[in-house]
């Protein structure tokens, strides 16, 4: 303890020895019944700024989720294995997710400890050609949920996608008119956010 305290620079706060776990209202989803499974591949073998080979389109939701459902996504960095220097930090809005599997192969498996432990709750994970994860989360609210690469240049160039969360009791679920209204509202909010930054 004295050795660690001596390592803290004058005027700097001492870091805690451990961090608190997830809030009690986050259930352990590792044994949960999964309603929907999807695979999300960030980038491609040529290094494109895509998710599942698609660039972002504000008028398109790539996944449709039911409100309150447990969703499982298998996340991969789709660039060739061995491209460990190229990362795509996966980030999702609206809710945290729980890591249920960590996949490491090639040099990453031989040379590094996992960056994240199974059971951890996060909102961002680093994806590499050699490192991927399976996550679970509960679809928390009706509306559009954004997922993207957390490197701004990559998301600006198309590595961004939307998931539409529907209320199963809604009569408008997945109708073209309802999706058009939701997309228009999202476009208006994006324009408004851009104006507020100027």
Image (spheres, rainbow, N blue to C red):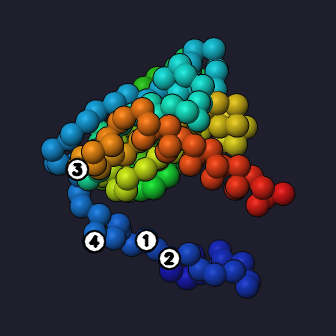
Q: CA distance from mark 1 to mark 2?
A: 7 Å
Q: Are marks 1 and 4 in contact (CB under 8 Å)?
A: no
Q: CA distance from mark 2 to mark 4?
A: 20 Å
Q: Residues within 10 Å of mark 4 (few under 14, many from 20)?
A: few
Q: Which residue is mark 1?
A: 19
Question: Vertically, is 191 above or below 51?
Answer: below
Which-is-in-front pick, marks 1 and 2?
Answer: 1
Nearest the viewer among 26 and 116 is 26
**Residue at image location 53% in from the left, 41% down from the top:** 183
Which-is-in-front pick, marks 3 and 4?
Answer: 3
Sooner in the amino-acid sequence: mark 1 or mark 3: 1
Question: Vertically, is 139 above or below 80?
Answer: below
Q: Are marks 1 and 2 in contact (CB under 8 Å)?
A: yes
Q: For residue 169, which numbered disc appears in the image?
A: 3
Task: Give the residue at the far top of this rendering.
Answer: 46
Could you say whether the residue bearing mark 2 is in a helix, strand or loop?
loop
Q: Residues within 10 Å of mark 1 (few under 14, many from 20)?
A: few
Residue 69 visible in the shown view: no
Q: Which residue is mark 4?
A: 24
Could you say whether the residue bearing mark 1 is in a helix, strand or loop?
loop
Q: Quadrant of residue 72?
A: top left
Percent of width and height locating residue 28: 23, 57
Q: Residues within 10 Å of mark 3 (few under 14, many from 20)?
A: few
Percent of width and height locating residue 102: 36, 38
Which-is-in-front pick, marks 1 and 3?
Answer: 3
Q: Quadrant of residue 140?
A: bottom left
Percent of width and height locating residue 108: 49, 31
Q: Are marks 1 and 3 in contact (CB under 8 Å)?
A: no
Q: For residue 16, which numbered disc appears in the image?
A: 2
Task: Give the residue at the far right of this rendering.
Answer: 198
Could you say whether the residue bearing mark 3 is in a helix, strand or loop?
loop
Q: CA distance from mark 1 to mark 4?
A: 14 Å
């Amino acid at each position: 303890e004295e050795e660690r305290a001596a390592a803290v620079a004058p005027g700097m706060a001492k870091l805690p020895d451990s961090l608190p776990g997830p809030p009690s209202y986050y259930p352990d989803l590792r044994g949960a019944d999964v309603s929907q499974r999807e695979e999300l591949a960030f980038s491609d073998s040529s290094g494109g700024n895509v998710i599942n080979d698609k660039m972002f389109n504000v008028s398109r939701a790539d996944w449709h989720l039911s409100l309150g459902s447990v969703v499982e996504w298998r996340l991969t960095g789709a660039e060739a294995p061995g491209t460990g220097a190229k990362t795509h930090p996966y980030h999702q809005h609206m809710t945290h997710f729980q890591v249920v599997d960590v996949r490491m192969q090639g040099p990453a498996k031989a040379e590094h400890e996992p960056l994240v432990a199974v059971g951890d709750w996060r909102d961002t994970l680093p994806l590499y050609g050699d490192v991927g994860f399976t996550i679970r989360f509960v679809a928390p609210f009706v509306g559009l949920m954004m997922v993207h690469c957390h490197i701004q240049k990559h998301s600006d160039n198309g590595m961004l996608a939307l998931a539409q969360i529907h209320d199963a009791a809604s009569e408008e679920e997945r109708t073209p008119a309802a999706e058009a209204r939701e997309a228009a509202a999202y476009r208006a909010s994006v324009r408004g956010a851009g104006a507020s930054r100027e």
